[in-house]
Image (cartoon, helix red, strand yellow):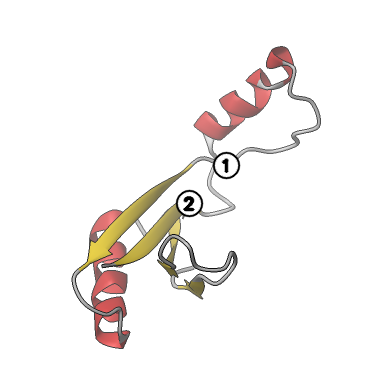
Amino acid sequence: MARVVVDVMLKPEILDPQGQAVQRALPRLGFEGITDVRQGKRFELDLDGPVDEAALARIREMAGEFLANTVIEDFRVRVEEPEGAAAGEAAEEEVAR
């Protein structure tokens, strides 16, 4: 089984009040040196069969129409390697801006 991950984040120019609240709370909890926090969403999609261009195209379409509000959010689609694969081998693809 293959896994595809869709990360959705607010665009940089969009205010992130939840991220700001976390950033302000960190020093009170003893976590110093964090200058910015942005909050986002992660979707993990397990696919039957191989992750080919057709499957990625369908996932990009789904992400752009359903998982992300592309007016205010960007998303990134990447294939996550199965457990036991060498670290850093995930294929990544920038999808929407």
Counting from the top left corner in percent of width and height, residue 86 is at 56, 68
One can see residue 68 in this view: no
Q: Which residue lies furthest to the right in this view?
A: 33
The residue located at (25%, 85%) in the rendering is 54
On screen, 15 above or below 92? above
Q: Residue furthest front?
A: 84
Q: Say what secondary structure mark 1 lies in.
A: loop
Q: Quadrant of residue 57?
A: bottom left
Instruction: Pick the residue in front: 34 or 20.
Output: 34
- Residue to which mark 1 is pinned: 38
The residue at the point 74 percent across, 24 percent down is 31
Q: What residue type is labelled 2?
A: Met
Q: Which residue position holds label 2? A: 9
Residue farthest along the bottom direction in this orientation: 53
In the image: residue 24, left or right of residue 54:
right
Above or below residue 66? Residue 56 is below
Which mark identifies residue 60? none
**Residue type marked 1:** Arg
Identify which residue is drawn at 71% across, 13% down: 28
